[in-house]
Image (spheres, helix red, strand yellow):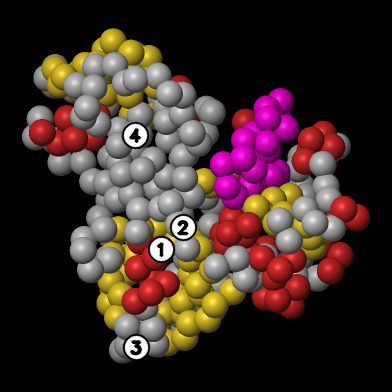
């Protein structure tokens, strides 16, 4: 079974500090009320925060993985979002107790000896900040490139400038022409063993995907906080076939995840927006229409995210 579908420990963590950051970002620091240390995590990890109405939202841990006395998350208020960020901004204060999952990581730092490029757009800095702290401590070669519209709206900038040596930090602001960086030019001059990790808004993600299209598969890694806009073509019905031969029709107005659950298969899910990977499963045959922001190019040949993705005709799943 895919380990991303495994249930996780839920802890009741206490908010011990909050602060506002530029760019309408709210930083929350969490500690366990009784235990001195929280479960260990690797850079790139995120936690699920369970909201009072039952919704679940994923937030990257942006603190140093060596400091386990507390978790730190940074939440950007999304005016067009689904309400989770607004609730956290408006309702959370010091003393609030939040149900928070143990960390999970589908954006890990890979082993390698070559240089690492960390490319962050806006609030996409959160997982990359944790990565840069580890790389900095390990003495590994890396550069952190941070792209925002303006210095005035760059969240966590003071933290970044304090934590990262200036020789490894590159700041790029749209309103400061001398700091601008052409992404295509930056990524066309790569060393053969370099790896790139990137995270940010959809346009930023798309630009880097285009610039790295000819990079070897194993050297490009990303995390998206929202799926890329898909085409406007209306969804078509299709059929899922399970391992035991059960045929599961998926109507136009129903997600594959809902149809699978209605057929009696217990498949865990969290975001149901194609960004967390909790419901990821394998497929054995068929033509999926991938609409997630999780799977790599290689993984799309055999993996499927049923909360948002669809298929043409018949899709045989490894379920």
Q: Which is nearer the N-term, disc 4 or disc 2?
A: 2
Inter-mark Cα distance, 1 to 2 = 6 Å
- Most extreme residue toward the top is 313
Report the residue at 35% width, 29% height from top.
309
Give residue 85's mark.
1
Judged left or right of residue 89, residue 266 is left
- Residue to which mark 4 is pinned: 308
The reply to whether callout 4 and callout 2 are in contact (CB within 8 Å) is no
Q: Are discs 1 and 2 less than 8 Å apart at CB?
A: yes
Q: Which residue is found at the position 58% from the left and 59% from the top?
A: 123
For the residue carrying disc 1, how many other residues have a C-alpha within 10 Å: few (<14), some (14-19), or many (20+)? some
Asked whether the residues under the numbered discs 2 and 3 touch, taking CB atoms below 8 Å apart as contact, a structural biologist would say no
- Closer to the camera in the image, 308 or 70: 308
Q: Is residue 193 visible?
A: yes
Label 3, residues with CA under 10 Å away: few <14, some 14-19, many ≥20: few
The residue mark sitting in front, 1 or 3, is: 1
Q: Is residue 203 magenta?
A: yes
Query: Which residue, given by chain and number where applicable, does mark 3 sit on?
Result: 95
SS class, disc 3: loop
**Residue positioned 63% across, 47% down in the render:** 198
Residue 24 at what x, y percent from top left?
A: 55, 68
Residue placed at 39% from the left, 48% from the top? Answer: 276
278 relative to 43 in the view: left or right: left
Tag 2 residue = 78
**Dot placed on the residue nearer the N-terminal end, 1 or 4:** 1
Is 71 situated above or below 270? below
């Amino acid at each position: 079974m895919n380990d991303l579908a495994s249930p996780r420990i839920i802890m009741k963590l206490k908010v011990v500090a909050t602060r506002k950051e530029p760019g309408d970002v709210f930083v929350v620091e969490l500690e366990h009320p009784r235990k001195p240390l929280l479960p260990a995590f690797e850079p790139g990890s995120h936690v699920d925060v369970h909201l009072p109405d039952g919704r679940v939202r994923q937030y990257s841990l942006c603190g140093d993985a060596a400091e386990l006395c507390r978790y730190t998350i940074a939440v950007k208020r999304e005016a067009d979002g689904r309400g989770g960020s607004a609730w956290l901004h408006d309702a959370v204060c010091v003393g609030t107790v939040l149900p928070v999952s143990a960390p999970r990581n589908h954006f890990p730092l890979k082993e390698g000896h070559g240089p690492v490029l960390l490319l962050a757009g806006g609030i996409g800095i959160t997982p990359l900040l944790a990565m840069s702290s580890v790389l900095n401590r390990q003495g590994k070669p890396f550069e952190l490139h941070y792209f925002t519209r303006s210095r005035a709206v760059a969240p966590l900038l003071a933290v970044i400038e304090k934590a990262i040596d200036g020789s490894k930090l590159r700041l790029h602001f749209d309103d400061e022409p001398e700091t601008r960086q052409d992404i295509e030019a930056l990524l066309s001059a790569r060393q053969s063993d370099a790896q790139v990790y990137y995270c940010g808004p959809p346009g930023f993600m798309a630009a880097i995907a285009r610039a790295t299209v000819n990079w070897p598969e194993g050297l490009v890694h990303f995390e998206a906080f929202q799926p890329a806009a898909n085409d406007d073509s209306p969804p078509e019905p299709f059929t899922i076939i399970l391992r035991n031969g059960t045929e599961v029709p998926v109507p136009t107005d129903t997600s594959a995840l809902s149809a699978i659950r209605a057929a009696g298969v217990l498949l865990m899910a969290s975001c149901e927006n194609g960004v967390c990977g909790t419901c990821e499963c394998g497929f054995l045959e068929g033509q999926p229409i991938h609409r997630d922001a999780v799977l790599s190019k290689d993984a799309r040949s055999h993996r499927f995210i049923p909360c948002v993705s669809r298929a043409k005709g018949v899709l045989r799943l490894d379920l």
